[in-house]
Image (spheres, grey):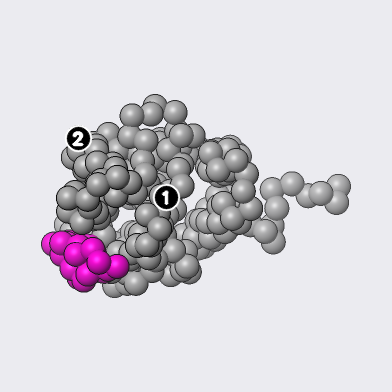
Amino acid sequence: MKINSNPLNGYTLNLTHVYKLNGNSNNHHSLFKQPVRDGGLNLDKLTLSSIQKGYPVGGLKIERAEKTVASVYYYDYFSVENMTGLTEEEKNRINEAITAATYIDPKYFTGGSTSDQFAMAMAQIKAKLDFVAEHIVPEQFKDQMMKATNQFIDDKFAVYNDQMLKIQQAIYDMYKDQSGPLKRISESAFQQIQAIKDGHSAIQKEQTYYLSLFSQLNGADESEFVQKYENVMKEYKEGQEGASQGDDFTKKRVDRNIRLLREMWNHFIDHLSGFDHYRVPTGETPLFDKTV
């Protein structure tokens, strides 16, 4: 079974972490920077679909990507059919759980995709797949599934980061022979190329950070799970808003991301049986009843 839709294709890519990155910082709050514009070319109007197809965008010629994020399929890493000793009913249950775990609501990326948004989606998918390994998959296949999940997410990020590198390479090639501010743009792009290749770019640090945040959900029982999920969302929100100094645009963007992440988590739980206590609050079902 394959993930048939690419939620990233065709949507505007916000180059917050692509165009001006602080790749040397160890403070995750400083990862959230605003894009720089040269007064002409609007780099925020690049799209992942343009990168993947090799189309020129705003004067930039982006090298065609050999692989897209959506072409990295979970079932290329872990096959339920190879789980010997299980009944067809058991295999179907695992298949359905994995399908729900890897689902991304198309609305999640509507209106633009930021690197934090992508990283949070991938980190939550990993948490859901780990949940399947912990609660649905028989013990003898648990470690195999978790290793497959780790590789799957690593490869998702690798493809995404390669596309970010191609953007930086295009920016560098466009401005490397210029002078003044445009020359500085090319120098910044070159620094980011090296940072991505070395694995130390702000985007990659962000991905590691959100994976670590979601890892606190691993092994959490039903009595503590919801609060741990709330802690993940709270830290994500505080980090983004703190770095942007609380501007309204970021607040609305992050609130929307969190709402959709909650809905996608509950969509996953709804496709399992007997795990209702792992549902998380949404706008309609707040964590605390304020009427009490």
Packing grade of label 2 (10 A; few <14, some 14-19, many >=20) is few
Q: Mark 1, mark 2: which one is toward the viewer?
A: 1
Residue extending farthest front = 180
Query: Residue type at mark 1?
Result: Pro
- How many numbered marks, from 0 up? 2
Residue 18 placement, left or right of 229: left
Q: Position of residue 248 (x, y in %)?
A: 63, 53
Does residue 62 appear anywhere in the picture? yes
Dot 2 corresponds to which residue?
198
In this view of the protein, which residue sits in the foreground, 75 or 197? 197
Residue 79's x, y, as percent? 20, 58
Query: Dot 1: within a 10 Å radius of its alpha carbon, few (fewer than 14), some, or many (20 or more) residues?
Result: some
Report the Cα–Cα distance between label 1 and label 2: 22 Å
What's drawn in magenta, residue-wise? 50-68
Asked if labels 2 and 1 touch by Cβ distance under 8 angstroms, the answer is: no
Q: Quadrant of residue 99?
A: bottom left
The residue positioned 58% from the left and 38% from the top of the image is 242
Query: Identity of the amino acid at label 2?
Result: Asp
